């Protein structure tokens, strides 16, 4: 089946929905919003902390936010991208509010601002400790009420369509690669449909599911990055995988592990060993408020030297009622497994959390493939550099969604549907009866990435990961050619592709920088100079 939509949006988190809402009422055409599960399962809903934006100019300013972002990014962030996000953040916040998103306010009617690690001021807008859930709720409601947006849940994008599918040889040196839409798996028919579009936007989220423990939902398999890479788009900074220092240690929940927001450390929680000893003074003068990469490595080191499965967060010194008011969901969650956070330590450990790299885009959200945009965690805008500053991700998604929408609306009249695109060919393939092969390979990817391409790396570990991923790649591609396309095998292909990209770009970086720390090059670039 062939379907036509002027705007094809793949991904239903904050990035995809902000873009869809921004173009929907333009009169430029119909929007398809495709998400691989249901609209409410996006990673956006898992974000607890909040959204970073300068809204109180009496005490804060853009320059401070810009500087904080550059410092956290280890000075390899793109300064223009940083300025673009920081200076357009207030406008993006207003758009979210106009679409029905609520942020907490104080008794004066001003935003109740939090402060998080790496921020020099209180600038985090939030909604209790479930900000992402509130953003997802507000945007979902606005999307579902918009008659110009068709929401296609449980539809899975298999491949981006380019000249390659018209019989043209496309390489990374090919100029003017063009995107004509995507092949998408229909959950009702289990057939791959052809979606033709004038413009396509990838907002497919992150890669956390590649690791054995992650704060991301199980759907975060790097689909957009892998599809774009196979279509020969430029992919950048994949070595910078951010591990959240503090997810709730609970072996029963690993995909996603329950996130203990960084705002809790901003509130006054202190990192300690289970015996009550503090340890962050050994690693950074900012103690528990150090940036995430430093805190994650410190926890990783303490766990290894003491043989621990977790360390602890202590906020028993804080007012109990105030703690419950600030963190109601975390309080209830911990209580459900027998931990009263007002009286007991919270067991925590690092977990794969955020991909700072991705599909390289410009300030309009355009990838290196014409008519293909990427926004949100699957993109690499240059904002994060070597390490994302806390709460900069949601605002980046909102700002770049609007930038991409503005650029799209100015150019879409120049494009037409390419009706020469052939339908998906699955002749000669078999129904996959060997599901155990896929589940075992997914488990292997998680072990490879966690053991060899995790918080601390080495040339030996990376080479071992490379060799094992290469073997999995060959086996999986052979299987993919033999069987009917399913969501499971497509996700596995994508996970292997993204694992390869993370490993390769980690091998290429011969220094410790930002989130990439290797024992073979322990000196920072500045130290080497």
Image (cartoon, grey):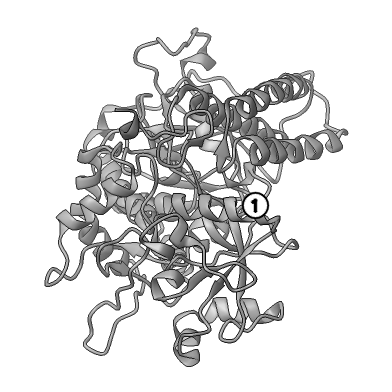
> In what quadrant of the picture does the C terminus appear?
top left
Furthest toward the left, the residue is 58
- Give the answer, above or below, for where 291 lies relative to 210: below
- Give the answer, above or below, for where 19 lies relative to 527: below
- Observer-nearest residue: 264 or 99? 264
Residue 489, picture quadrant: top right
Which residue is pictured at 56% across the width and 76% down the height? 330
Residue 55 is situated, as x and y percent measured from the top left of the image, at 20, 68
Residue 287, picture quadrant: bottom left
Residue 385 is situated, as x and y percent measured from the top left of the image, at 35, 39
- Give the answer, above or below, for where 272 lies relative to 356: below
Query: SS class of the residue under badge 1?
Result: helix
Residue 369 seen in the current view: yes
Residue 34 is situated, as x and y percent measured from the top left of the image, at 52, 46
- Observer-nearest residue: 352 or 161? 352
Q: How many marks?
A: 1
Residue 341, picture quadrant: bottom right
Q: Residues within 10 Å of mark 1 (few under 14, many from 20)?
A: few
Which residue is pictured at 69% across the width and 80% down the height? 336
Horizontal side of 210 relative to 176 (left or right) equals: right
> In what quadrant of the picture does the N terminus appear?
top right
Which residue is pictured at 41% across the width and 46% down the height? 376
Residue 190 seen in the current view: no
Horizontal side of 396 relative to 297 (left or right) equals: left
Q: Which residue is mark 1?
A: 305
- Observer-nearest residue: 335 or 160? 335
Furthest toward the bottom, the residue is 321
Residue 375 is situated, as x and y percent measured from the top left of the image, at 38, 43
């Amino acid at each position: 089946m062939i379907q036509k939509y002027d705007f094809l949006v793949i991904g239903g988190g904050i990035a995809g929905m902000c873009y869809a809402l921004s173009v929907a009422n333009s009169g430029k055409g119909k929007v398809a919003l495709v998400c691989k599960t249901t609209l409410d399962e996006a990673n956006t809903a898992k974000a607890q902390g909040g959204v970073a934006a300068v809204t109180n100019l009496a005490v804060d300013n853009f320059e401070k936010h810009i500087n904080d972002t550059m410092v956290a990014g280890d000075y390899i962030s793109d300064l223009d991208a940083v300025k673009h996000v920081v200076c357009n953040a207030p406008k993006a916040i207003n758009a979210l509010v106009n679409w029905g998103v609520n942020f907490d306010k104080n008794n004066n009617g001003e935003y109740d601002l939090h402060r998080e690690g790496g921020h020099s001021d209180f600038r985090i807008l939030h909604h209790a400790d479930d900000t992402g859930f509130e953003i997802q709720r507000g945007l979902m409601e606005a999307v579902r009420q918009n008659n110009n947006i068709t929401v296609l849940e449980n539809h899975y994008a298999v491949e981006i369509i380019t000249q390659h599918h018209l019989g043209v040889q496309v390489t990374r040196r090919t100029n003017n690669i063009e995107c004509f839409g995507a092949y998408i798996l229909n959950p009702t028919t289990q057939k791959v449909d052809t979606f033709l579009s004038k413009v396509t936007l990838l907002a497919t989220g992150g890669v956390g599911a590649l690791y054995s423990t992650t704060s991301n939902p199980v759907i975060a398999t790097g689909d957009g990055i892998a599809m774009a890479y196979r279509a020969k788009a430029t992919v950048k900074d994949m070595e910078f995988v951010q591990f959240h220092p503090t997810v709730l240690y609970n072996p029963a929940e690993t995909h996603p592990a329950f996130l203990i927001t960084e705002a809790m450390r901003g509130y006054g929680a202190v990192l300690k060993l289970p015996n009550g000893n503090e340890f962050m003074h050994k690693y950074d003068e900012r103690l528990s408020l150090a940036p995430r990469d430093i805190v994650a490595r410190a926890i990783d080191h303490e766990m290894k030297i003491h043989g621990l499965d977790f360390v602890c967060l202590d906020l028993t010194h804080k007012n109990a009622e105030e703690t419950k008011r600030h963190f109601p969901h975390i309080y209830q969650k911990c209580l459900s497994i027998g931990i009263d956070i007002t009286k007991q330590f919270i067991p925590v450990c690092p977990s794969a959390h955020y991909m700072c790299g991705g599909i390289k885009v410009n300030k309009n959200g355009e990838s290196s493939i014409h008519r293909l945009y990427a926004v949100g965690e699957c993109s690499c805008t240059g904002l994060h550099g070597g390490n994302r500053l806390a709460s900069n991700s949601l605002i980046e998604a909102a700002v770049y969604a609007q930038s991409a929408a503005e650029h799209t609306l100015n150019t879409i009249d120049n494009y037409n549907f390419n009706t020469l695109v052939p339908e998906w060919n699955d002749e000669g393939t078999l129904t996959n009866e060997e599901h155990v092969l896929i589940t075992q390979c997914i488990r292997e990817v998680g072990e490879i990435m966690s053991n060899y391409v995790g918080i601390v790396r080495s040339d030996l570990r990376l080479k071992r990961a490379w060799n094992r991923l290469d073997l999995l790649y060959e086996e999986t591609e052979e299987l993919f050619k033999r069987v009917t396309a399913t969501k499971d095998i497509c996700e596995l292909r994508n996970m292997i592709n993204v694992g390869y990209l993370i490993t390769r770009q980690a091998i290429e970086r011969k220094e410790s920088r930002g989130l990439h720390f290797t024992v073979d090059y322990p000196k920072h670039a500045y130290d080497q100079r």
